[in-house]
Amino acid sequence: MIRMKETPKTIKVHFVKNDIDPTGLGEPPFPPVFGAVANALHKKMGKRFYNQPFSKDFTKKV
C-alpha cells in the first residue's frame, strides 16, 4: 500500500459503459486491506485480531 504522501495529486477515474449491472465497483480492495491491518495490529500489540470491526478489541488489554 502506498502512503498518502506518495499518492498522485489528481486521480482520473473512468467508467466503461456497458449492459452489465453494477456489482460494487469499490469493494474489491477491501479483503486484503483488512488482513494487512490485522497483521499490523498483531505486530504492534502482540495479539491476533480475528473478528471485525477491530475497534471493540482495542479496549482489551493484551
Image: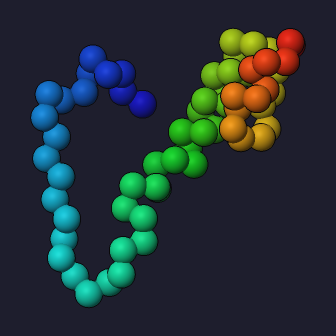
Q: How many marks?
A: 0
Q: Residue at x 37, y 61 (%)?
A: 25
Residue 12 lies left or right of residue 39; in this view the side is left
Q: Position of residue 5 (x, y in %)?
A: 27, 17
Q: Quadrant of residue 18?
A: bottom left
State the quadrant of the N terminus. Answer: top left
Up the image or down, 45 lies above or below 31; here it is above
Q: Position of residue 53 (x, y in %)?
A: 69, 38
Up the image or down, 36 lies above or below 29; here it is above
Q: Quadrant of residue 55?
A: top right
Q: Residue at x 69, y 12 (%)?
A: 44
Outermost residue, bottom direction?
A: 19
Residue 59 lies left or right of residue 8; in this view the side is right
State the quadrant of the C terminus. Answer: top right
Q: Residue at x 46, y 55 (%)?
A: 27
Figure colour scheme? rainbow
Q: Position of residue 56 (x, y in %)?
A: 76, 29
Q: Residue at x 32, y 22 (%)?
A: 4
Up the image or down, 27 lies above or below 20; here it is above
Q: Quadrant of residue 24?
A: bottom left
